Amino acid sequence: MNVRDAAGPNVPDAARKGFGFLRWIDRFRRRARAFGIRDGVFDVAFRGVRFNAEVIRKDRSQPEFTRQIWNYLDAVV
């Protein structure tokens, strides 16, 4: 089952993506616990953190990952 199925057919894409983000936070919390980070510390660090689709879009369109290597190097060197 994927997030789209779990969220249901009438839920907007933005909500589905937010649901995926909440799942990511839950998994990240478990990793933090495994490294000895208490839930209270985690909660303070993540207070106010919200899903931001613009961050994802920018991350996925970084030139070093979307341009051919020589075009990228010509632009940055």
Image: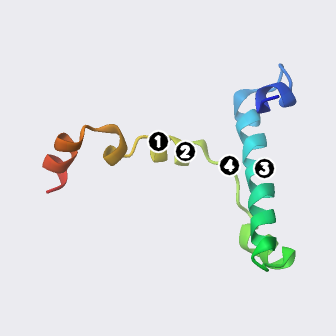
Q: Amino acid at mark 4?
A: Phe
Which residue bears the numbered disc 1? 60
Query: In the image, residue 26 lies at what x, y percent?
Result: 81, 56
When the figure is inspected, residue 15 is found, relative to residue 55, above or below; the finding is above
Q: Residues within 10 Å of mark 2 (few under 14, many from 20)?
A: few
Quick one: quadrant of the C terminus? bottom left
Residue depicted at 32% across the width and 48% down the height? 64
Question: Is label 1 in contact with label 2 (beta carbons under 8 Å)?
Answer: yes
Which residue bears the numbered disc 4? 51
Which residue bears the numbered disc 2? 56
The outermost residue toward the front is: 34
SS class of the residue under badge 4?
Answer: loop
Mark closer to the chain start, 1 or 3: 3
Distance of label 1 from label 2 (alpha carbons): 6 Å
Which residue bears the numbered disc 3? 22
Nearer to us in this view, 11 or 76: 76
Q: Residues within 10 Å of mark 3 (few under 14, many from 20)?
A: some
SS class of the residue under badge 1?
Answer: helix
Mark closer to the chain start, 1 or 4: 4
Question: Is label 2 in contact with label 3 (beta carbons under 8 Å)?
Answer: no
Query: In the image, residue 12 lies at what x, y percent?
Result: 75, 27
Q: Amino acid at mark 3?
A: Leu
Q: Amino acid at mark 2?
A: Ile
Distance of label 2 from label 3 (alpha carbons): 15 Å
Mark closer to the chain start, 2 or 3: 3
Q: Is residue 58 left or right of residue 74?
A: right
Mark closer to the chain start, 4 or 2: 4
Residue depicted at 86% across the width and 24% down the height? 8
Question: Is label 4 in contact with label 2 (beta carbons under 8 Å)?
Answer: no
Quick one: quadrant of the N terminus? top right
Q: Amino acid at mark 1?
A: Arg
Question: Is label 1 in contact with label 4 (beta carbons under 8 Å)?
Answer: no
